[in-house]
Image (cartoon, rainbow, N blue to C red):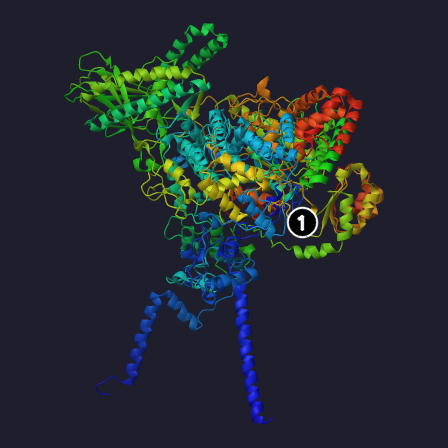
Amino acid sequence: MGAAFLGSLAGRASASVTPLDFSRPPSQPLAALPPEFAPKARRVIYLHMAGAPSQLELFEHKPELTKFDGKDCPASFLAGKRFAFISGVPQLLGAQYPFHQAGQAGAWISDRLPHLEKHIDDLCFVRSMRTDQFNHAPAQLLLQTGHERLGFASFGSWVTYGLGTENQNLPGFIVLTSGGKNPDGGKQLWGPGYLPGVYQGVQCRSLGEPVLYLKNPAGVSRPLRRRMLDSIGAINGLTHAEYANPETVTRTAQYELAFRMQIEATDAMDWPGEPAAVRARYGARPGEASFANNCLVARRLAERGVRFIQLHHWGWDSHGASQNEALNIGFADRCRETDQPIAALLTDLKERGLFDDTLVVWAGEFGRTSMRENRGGQEMQFVGRDHNPGAFTIWMAGGGVKPGMSYGETDPLGYEIVKNPVEVRDLHATLLYLLGLDHRKLTYPFQGLDQKLTSVKPARIVGDLLA
Amino acid sequence: MKRASRARLGIVAIALLAIAAGAVWHFADRHDAVRSTVSFNRDVRPILNEKCVACHGGVRQLGDVSFIYRDEALGKGKSGRPTVVPGKPRASELVARVTSRDPETRMPYHAAPLEPREIDLLRRWIEEGAVWEDHWAFVAPKRPAEPAVRNASWPRGDLDRFVLARLEREGLSPSVEADKEALLRRVSFDLTGLPPTPATIAEFLADESPDAYEKQVDRLLASPQYGERWASMWLDLARYADSKGYEKDADRPVWPYRDWVVDAFNRNVPYDRFVITQLAGDLLPEATLEDRIATAFQRLTPVNDEGGTDDEEFRLVAVMDRVATTWSVLNGVTINCVQCHAHPYDPIRHDEYYESLAFFNTSRDADREDDFPTIRVANEVARRVDVAASGVRARNAMHAIVEAGRALREKTSWSPLPVTGALVNEKAMLEQIVADLEKASRDPAIERKKERAEIRKWFANEIAMRRQELASKRGAPPRPLGIEKGQVRAVGTIPSQAMFDLDVPLGSAAAITALRIEVSPQDAKTARHTPEEGFIVSRVEAWLAAEGAPRRKIAFRMFARDSQEVLAGAVEAMAAESGDGLDSGQFAANPKLDRARWIVAIPDEPIPSSAGSRLELRLTQTGNFGGRPAPARRIDLATTSDAHWLQFAGDPKVAGELVELVRLEKAGARVPGVALPVMDEAKVYERRPTMVFERGNLLVKVGEPLEPDVPAALPKLPADSARDRLALARWFFSPGQPLTARVAVNRFWEQLFGTGIVETLEDFGSVGQPPSHPELLDWLAVHFQADLHWDVKALLRELVTSATYRQSAKVGAGLLARDPANRLLARGPQQRLTAEMVRDQALAASGLLTPRVGGPPVMPPQPEGIWKTVYNDDKWIDATGPDRYRRALYTYLKRSAIYPSFVTFDASEHVVSLARRIPTNTPLQALGTLNDPVYAEAADALARQMSKSPDGKLDAKLNSGARRVLSRELSAGELRELEAAFADARRMAGEPAAYSAVASILLNLDAALTR
Amino acid sequence: MRNGVSARAYFIGVAVVSALLLALAMALRPSFAYAVRDTFGLVQPVPAAPDSFYTTRVAPLFAEHCTGCHGGKRQKGDLRLDELAAVMRGGKHGPVIRAGSAGESELVARIGLPQTDPKAMPPQGKEPLSGDDVAVVRAWIAAGASATRLARDIAGAPPPVRKIEIPVLDTATAARERAAFAAPLADLQARYPGAIAFVSRSSADLEINASRLGASFDDGDLAALEPLRDRIVRLDVSGTRVGDASGPALAAMHRLQVLRALDTGMSAKSLAPLRDRGTKVHDGRF
């Protein structure tokens, strides 16, 4: 490990708050470190819906918008705004699905998420999220790394840097993707940025080899591998006796850890081994890298002490430019692919006593416009909405958030926030608080600045979201 | 004794006492002063940086107090009291505030008070006159005196003397020289990135001559592998990658630049020339093809081609990345912080960031999907020069034609031609598209293609869809466009495929020799620095409707365009196979409209414009910017009867040249090669002004345009020099420049010793780490610049042949505890192999390595499913044959999915300029070198080598493997362990598997993964 | 006293003129008028009740956004907003609050203006009051700008925003408490690697996760945790061989808040007492 650097955090730039010390013995970069204060959540399952699901077809009931369906969009909505594809004067578009009230709080929800609806009283909705990026890759980078430019550390990397991980035989930050494509932001969404490489997200797969290069090559049985590791350890011992470089001892330890990881990771990812009833609850089917399989794996990893689990499901970008991007076709598929598995995950976490201290976050990277997209200045073949960074809706559950909460409001047409806007950095500060960390003290010195996930602007912890 | 004498005695005693007290007080004070005087840089600045600058520095100046500049620190705050009064701590508000007991006034405000030690340092600094020092890195290095050393025999050169002096001061002594095998392995990896071959080891061991080692060093420096190893270092800094990044992450072939870097290192191009060519090669007098290829260094920023992005935003992001990369790589200055505010603690003001930006904001790249401007580089090196020569000739010819056209337009007196009728006509557009589709579908060439069925089906589907649209709302009759005072003003929704039909009454007496069509921004002043959406007109047609005569189409002989890029676009269209080879009059502001753009249509013969006749002008617009329509929204027409335009159209130097340009374009397109993005300076009439962005927001520019300049804290640009990139590039290497040489030698040092003399290579500012050996750093810097004249190989030769470098890496417990990170250099360096070296060693040791240098990137085995990029169906096809075993440098680097084993071994993500890699030690690395198919294949190949080695005995076979992987023989203990492992493995899985197992053990030893 | 005015007339004249001048001055400068009435004790400033809506909701808003320029050190426009009496007195141009009518209160008008308006308060560049903040002030004034009325009887006031304050990290007390059981903790952590950790940097409480030790962790091991029993607040023995025999050991952990015991030998009966005393028990049974 870059001991010389990590160990000596001297000469830091001045900060109004003294950062915590995250240095560790170089041989255990992922060793667990206690949070600053008692945490509400001990692990995170982050469900990133890549492409930005339309809040107006899921959670935001706007009868006024339905009334003005097809009318020209008011000029005030367009002045001074930059759009990805809308040009000239688009028309307003009412919700494409019927809404009804559900749960004790009578929260409005469309008919696209019948399974999740059963958990609506557990969910804490934030209806007034705001971002300043209107393109997918920069917006996803902002949400996952606190910066819209490449090169910064991802949320999961910060959490494993700050807290390490409980189970040393598994990676601390595991990423699973589905939906046929990687998210638009690419691997940088779970990259270490300027943090040491060991804090990167490890991409695992619920189909084929769970972790890259986990399985031994053909012809190398487990006992043979054990015998080889014994020799490696012995000879490294001789080297250490002669050179005394501490990294030599660390390297031998990593080979033993890899040997154990081969067992633990294979077992953790062996979701087909779950009882049929559990697999049926998720709708998990072997032979495909589906979101359902990934949700079941997420619960198994949570049980085994993995600190940060991130699922990316691509395909929510409902512009209306093709069937897959149509609000009445592709969008409905995405809902079907994710509704049952997410509900099953929440139920499973409750039954297995993990719900209270597992923070589940469901979010896209921005919202969609109240207007129908008119790409190329023409009426498009399918129905879709353009990107709206001005207002989007996410929900959280478990891990110390207030169940049945609805925070923030948008105007009757669902276009702009009128109450309690929440910036992306505010969300980050709040999630870190739930994990027992003060976002101002979780820092890493780089380029002469104590870098933070919430960057340099002031961020507020949204107290009203906490139980 | 009498009373008096007693009294006298008393007085004498008192006097003596007084004298003694005075002496004690006096000496005490001097003693106090004997303690080293307070150094501002060493003692005071770190306190200010850590406890004060967050509120009283570059970002904020609460209470109008700041500690960045001397005049501010000695000035008055809002309280009206001077912050620091030299010589009078009691009169300095600083001392009052840090010692105050009232929490409302004590500084640091609402935070823990300063430690007594720190307060004492501040007080003594002020007492001693508050002597201000500039930060050491901003003061040019002076050649330090040669330090005296006791053990005069150890140093081999001057740099050893500095290291030894420090060791002797610390009471340490240097280690013995490393044994020959370890030293050869270390220097082979450090200089070439590859282990020594068994033959080289044997030759070196047998060579008893005193300069045996120096001979090996010279051999390594002369080998082509040297350039490949040092190119790896430089490509981290250049953020080199083979794809664009972000969502689409499309393939972008820039490998000719990588080959240039490898070749430049091998030719030992002096470091100043090496950098100046990359910063401003295109501006060099008689710039060669090589000089232009080098400027691709500036064009490697990730590019966002996602649909719906604002190209001006990402153009500026690229320009800002160039500024940040240039300052970070060359001077270790974090100027990127200064985008939004003055530098938090180094003396760089906010507007000085934009004075640097002004050097780079005049380049012609504009985040276009075709990466304009590019130069054509033939794959085949032999053909490159002539292909490039014709490219440069074409570009200069186009500039000449454009300049001539611009001059003539300037001289011509134009009479405005007010438009009276304007329609946006989708119906005609759709009919045109259907007609074109049907014509194309009848092309006989289709029958010869094997996928003709799909093509026919595609055509049928497209034609049906367009016909269906014709029947729908889009087929409605044309809608009127706004007109104000003869100017077309298109507002509201304009479809991206439409024709503008303009109706223009004529009536001037003289016949029209040229028609000028001008498209201007809606707010000309703002557009200069914050351009509006661009436009694309793909075809210009006109008809004349004279009184009582049939409506006839006007044939245009030629079009004069307002810039080279537009002419280049037209030439490309004319050269396209599918086109009809005629000039359709296309012109555009692509992607943004920052000034009025125009085209002049020159008819075959003058157009009669008798009263009552009318001109019908049709502008076809089918282009779009990533899905957004690109209509011309403000159109003005003007005509002239000046005969020069007809001569211009007929002039062989113009018309003839155009034909030649189309021919060159067609010829160029047929040569297999790449369009390499390079730097190209905008002409004066295209140049953008650069102003300060309010708090860094690129949408809000404030103040007057700035002149390019360098920060005031650094030496001035030569007064007479031009203010362009070339001047800036040369300035970095001017004698007074304090940082370039230091940062360069520090980087070479870090590559060889594992840690820089200044550990934070990316930050030489006042919060970066101070140098461990300041005099050594300055001596190396002056030596590299003044004595070696930036000769890289000479510098590296001196470093690797120094006694400091040749020390053994073995360390006793005492020294390890005293200096775990080897910052005092009492022992030789020992580093883990870089990601590239891990792969290259496995291939070299197993005999699989294909040593070919240069060429397009290759795709060695990678697990499937890694490449799943949105809107991009590039495929990773595992290479078979020699390309499967090329050096890591040549592996295809896709930004959104870096080759997995490189990432695991801490390689750069190649998205931002990376100053240094932080090595880690993880289980995933173990899994990689044990199970990755690349290493499994290498182990099997090594096993075959060992089993086939001539000497029959097992220990000889094992040693043959050890010499390849560990560059030495096995020790007795190692041999015993491997023989036992071989026996057990043979029992478990047979002999071939046993050899593979032992080979894999060798490749996974700690000794194999270090150098 | 023929050619002069009599002393008495002179005295009355002076009194009348000064009264007139005083009245004129009071009319022109309301803050002067208030000062006059205040000196004559005609005004009874009512001290704000500590639990009143004003103290809990309105005063903090003034403190956060206004007292920088309208407070103890500086009173721009002669206006002080850091205590109720001064708030009611108003500024140079008179009272800024008309009790009972938010619409006619200058203060409400000013804090409602958009940032770009030159008269907006706080002025441009400073953090403006949010919509909810303005609603709180309006509700208070509408309900009579009372110094005593409690939050619950002020209609229409938005709920208070919950502020999160992170205390300064105090590791000293934790270090003292931890010292008491440092030895037993050290060897138990060695025996069960990665299973025993402190809840946080400022706490001496422990959370133990033995689930990854699986079958190798049994009742004997649970008993070995006895020296730490007062410190254990969370315990996970899922998938281990812990059985009902550990009932007493668990009972002894009287500060145990959460127990996770899925797939263990413990019967519901043996877990019931823990649930009864308030420990949250997860054993996978419903």
- Residue B306, x across and y down, in percent: 47, 28
Query: Residue pushed farthest left?
Result: B509
Observer-nearest residue: A78 or B416?
Answer: B416
From this view, report whether residue A54 is shown above or below residue B712.
Answer: above
In this rendering, would B409 be left or right of A408?
Answer: left
Subunit under mark 1: C
Horizontal arrangement in the rendering, residue B535 relative to residue B544 (left or right): right
Q: Nearer the viewer, residue B1007 or A449?
A: B1007
Who is closer to the viewer here, A275 or B476? A275
Q: Residue at x 37, y 49 (%)?
A: C117
Q: Please give the residue where the numbered disc 1 appears in the rendered image.
A: C200
Which quadrant of the view contains residue C86?
A: bottom left
Instruction: Point out the image quarter for the N terminus of chain A.
Output: top right
Element under label 1? Answer: loop
Picture coordinates of residue B744 (x, y %)? 49, 40
User: Is residue B503 in view from this perspective?
Assistant: yes
Residue most extreme to the front: B209
Is B1008 or B835 nearer to us in this picture? B1008
Left or right relative to B513: residue B764: right
The percent position of residue A290, horizontal first and vertical second, equals: 63, 26
Q: Residues within 10 Å of mark 1 (few under 14, many from 20)?
A: many
Count of numbered circles on the image: 1
At which x and y percent is residue A342? 63, 32
Mark 1: amino acid: Ser
Relative height, residue B914 to residue B671 (above, below): below
Q: Is residue B587 visible?
A: no
Residue at x-position 42% and y-position 40%: B733
